[in-house]
Image (spheres, helix red, strand yellow):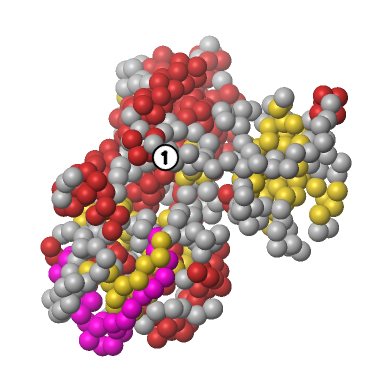
Amino acid sequence: MKKPYYITTAIAYTSGKPHIGNTYEIVLADSIARFKRMQGYDVRFQTGTDEHGQKIEEKAIAADVSCKEFVDDVAAEIKRIFDLMNTSYDKFIRTTDDYHEKQVQKIFKKLYDKGDIYKGEYEGMYCTPCESFFTASQLVDGKCPDCGREVKPAKEEAYFFRMSKYTQRLIDYINEHPDFIQPESRKNEMMNNFLLPGLQDLCVSRTSFQWGIPVDFDPKHVVYVWIDALSNYITGLGFDLDGNSDEMFEKYWPADVHLIGKDILRFHTIYWPIMLMALDLPLPKQVFGHPWLLQGDGKMSKSKGNVIYADDLVNFFGVDAVRYFVLHEMPFENDGVITWELMIERMNSDLANTLGNLVNRTISMSNKYFNGVVSDKHAEEAVDAELKEVALNAVKKTVQKMDKLRVADAITEIFTLFKRCNKYIDETMPWALAKDEAKHDRLATVLYNLVEAITIGASLLKPFMPETADKIAAQLNTSLREMDELDSFGKYVSGTTVAAKPEILFARLDVAKTMEKVNELMEAQRADAAPEEEAKEEEPVIDIEPKEEISYDDFAKMQFQVGEIIACEAVKKSKKLLCSQVKIGSQVKQIVSGIKAYYSPEEMVGKKVMVLVNLKPAKLAGVLSEGMLLCAEDADGNLALVTPEKPMPSGAEIC
């Protein structure tokens, strides 16, 4: 009997079409689900849409449609994108589904009846996009601490959840289950910033808008987003509070992993576990807060023409190339960066060259020298043992990485095998062996080893690039293997005939021509920007006290260049300083900056910045600084790094 494995994504908010950063999560979850199936698990993979709330009500009014019409359209678009990316979810839940709404009402009433929910009044600052209340002390520079947007004062009657009743119980649980919150840094953040200081009771109903699930015993209230949205993980399994749950709930709950963005970690590791404790239900085994996939030149905006959507990327590169990029380029804990230029680079180097060319060469040589018949003649040499070792180690290491959800690292292990295959070709030189009749069996053995190693690599690649893996297997006239079939080298059936003509898996792209088409797409995006995005209020200006005039000779003494931040960490002895390693051309300089209040170390990595290079080195808080990062400062003292408007190489002179 297969062991059950239940994985979920956060449900997507139906406020608009998801960009590639939103789409990344479903692809990540899909790769994990497919890998677990490959290992023999009985996988249940759930995703869906979060469809209630004030923001949606406002958008529907602006669009002059009903709220249900609005969410129907957006949910359909989200599902289209998820399907386009070849994701293998088993359930797509919508929070407007009748069965979900009924169970949410039951859950709310149950918590009210046992005294965990009570009626009161809320007065505070409200962030509409986050649908969250905050006290003045929780705000950051007067704005929402989660998203940085404006907040408005709000006061209304509301129901509250007694979070404090369960705080110590949750702290104990987290301490007793060290893998419950991953990565480790996320656990520390939740404990130190929220649980240990003490939880405030949570507002769980609203009266200022109507688009939500009504509180059935007090209809002027609608159930607030967190009880509504978070409950999807059990309602989607057929949970019933009256004791008539579907057998799927008994089989798959508790979830093996909730895969979510790091921005909603608090709700999934504090609010949701406390709700489950109050309902006497088991907690999920793990909540994994993945980092963000960011646009290379800043925040995505239609008016700036830099929003990247999954379907646009697919039109340029294909589904599997996009899957490869978003999975491979995302670090385990730090944010990843996506740019069109980097996509083209990965397409040409990793996919067209390392993988595509390997498969093409191997099939072409098999056809040229043996009419496509691949046979193991057992004419082994020492170099073969190393290839076999790398292939079997790739299996072992990929499993190890995936057990820790280190998906990018797992893909790296697979491509290490493909790179070793290319090196094996260079070492054995089949074209030279073909000139010597006495080397006939050796040549056959070399090509057999290549086909077998590629088959192993393609089998491992299946969860991440399913269409590509299937194409490779079809060209090699073999089947992809499940994990328990990857325990040894040499299972490719000797005497099999490969495809008569290899199919090009990934075509190299002309950088200039591709970027020309990208720029046309971005220009069209700017032209189609929503009127409200174009017609923003004129930004305020700032006048500062002028300094003494300088001559051009004075200015010419300063050397400004573009730098790329490759590493960053907080300075231990300072509350304000970050220490960055900045690549400037072929050199790396260490620069200390007083911007810790405005950027986390993770946000800094990957940024292109403007650097004063020839500033005399100095020690700040005992740390050597070899330059200065240029920043802009507004009237409130907020800082922002000055970055190049267009992509520029590290070391470019600023003049």
Is residue 489 rendered to the left or right of residue 283? right
Above or below residue 11? Residue 606 is above
Q: Residue at x 51, y 28 (%)?
A: 341
Q: Which range of residues does the magenta coloring cover?
A: 100-127
Q: Residue at x 83, y 50 (%)?
A: 624
Where is residue 233 drawn, in percent x and y? 28, 65
Where is residue 646 drawn, in percent x and y? 56, 28
**Quadrant of the image occupied by residue 113:** bottom left
Is residue 605 rendered to the left or right of residue 589? left
To which residue does mark 1 refer? Answer: 536
**Quadrant of the image occupied by residue 167:** bottom left
Residue 589 visible in the snapshot: no
Above or below residue 425? Residue 251 is below
Above or below residue 540? Residue 382 is above
Residue 266 visible in the snapshot: yes
Where is residue 458 drawn, in percent x and y? 39, 37
Q: Residue at x 15, y 59 (%)?
A: 97
Q: Within 10 angstroms of label 1, few (less than 14), some, or many (20 or more) residues?
A: few
